[in-house]
Image (tube, rainbow, N blue to C red):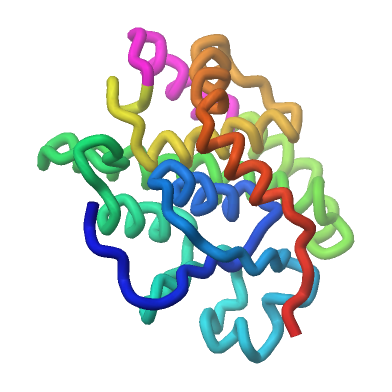
Amino acid sequence: MSNEPIGRRILWGAGTPRTMRPHWALHELSLSYECEAISARGGGTKTERFSALNPRQKIPVLQDGGFTIAESAAIIAYLAESYCDTAVRLLPAGRRERAQWLEWSIFICMELDATALYVIRRHVGLPHIYGEAPTAVEAAKSYLARQLGSVDQKLGDGRCYLMGDQFTTADILLATCLTWALRFNVPVHENSQVYLDRITAREAYRKALMANEARPEPVP
C-alpha cells in the first residue's frame, strides 16, 4: 500500500448518498479518518472554516494531510489511486479496463445522479426550496427507469461487479444511486436488485453506512 501522507485525514459530510461514497471507499481501503458530520443544509457548509476548504460550499470534501479534494466521484477515485495494494484495488489496472471504468463512472454521475435523481431530490424532497415540478419529476423518473434498464441488461450476463470480478469505485457510485432510486420508489430491475443485495452485504458498506448516518452537526 502507498505510504500515507503526514497529517490528519478528515472527511467532511454525512447523511446523503453522495457523502456515503467516500465513507465507503475509506472503509474498503481500511483507512483511518475523522468525520466532520456536517449536512448539506444544517449550516455547516456555510461557515468560514468550511468555505475556505470548498468555496462551492458543497459536501463531501476530503482533507488528506495537506491535500484537499471535493466531489464524491473524484474523492473515491483519488483514494483508490493513492491507496491500493494487491489485496484491495478499487481501480482496474489495464488501459482499456480503466477506460471502461471511466465510462461507467461518468454515466452514473451524469445520467443517473445529476440528470435524474437530483431532479427528483430537489422537487420531491425539497419542494420548499426548489418548488414543485411534477412534470419534471415524472420525466426524470421515466428517464431514470430507462437508463436503469440498460444497467440491468449489462448485469444480466452474470458478472459480479460492473468491471466483472473486480469491485471498483464504479460499484460504489452505482450502488448509492440504486439505493437512492429505491427511496424515491423508482423500481430497480431484478438483476440490479441481486447485484445491490450482494454489494450492500459487504462489511465495508455496513461500516460506512453507520458512519454516514451520524447526526450531522454544524461546525462553528
Q: Is residue 162 above or below residue 26?
A: above
Q: Residue at x 35, y 27 (%)?
A: 162
Determine the main secondary structure of the stretch shown in magenta: helix
Q: Is residue 196 left or right of residue 110?
A: right
Q: Residue at x 44, y 24 (%)?
A: 151
- Is residue 22 visible from the viewing direction of this image? yes
- Numbered label tally: 0
Q: Residue at x 37, y 81 (%)?
A: 66
Viewer-proximal residue among 180 and 168: 168
Viewer-proximal residue among 50 and 57: 50
Instruction: Please provide percent x and percent y for residue 152.
Output: 46, 17
Q: Is residue 155 magenta?
A: yes
Q: Is residue 34 above or below residue 161?
A: below
- Is residue 110 visible from the viewing direction of this image? no
Q: Residue at x 60, y 70 (%)?
A: 58
Viewer-proximal residue among 77 and 201: 201
Specify start and end residues of the magenta stretch as a single range: 144-160
Q: Is residue 159 magenta?
A: yes
Quarter occupied by the C terminus: bottom right
User: Residue 183 lies in what quarter of the image?
Assistant: top right
Q: Is residue 54 above or below residue 146?
A: below
Instruction: Please provide percent x and percent y for residue 111.
Output: 48, 42
Instruction: Please provide percent x and percent y for residue 67.
Output: 37, 77
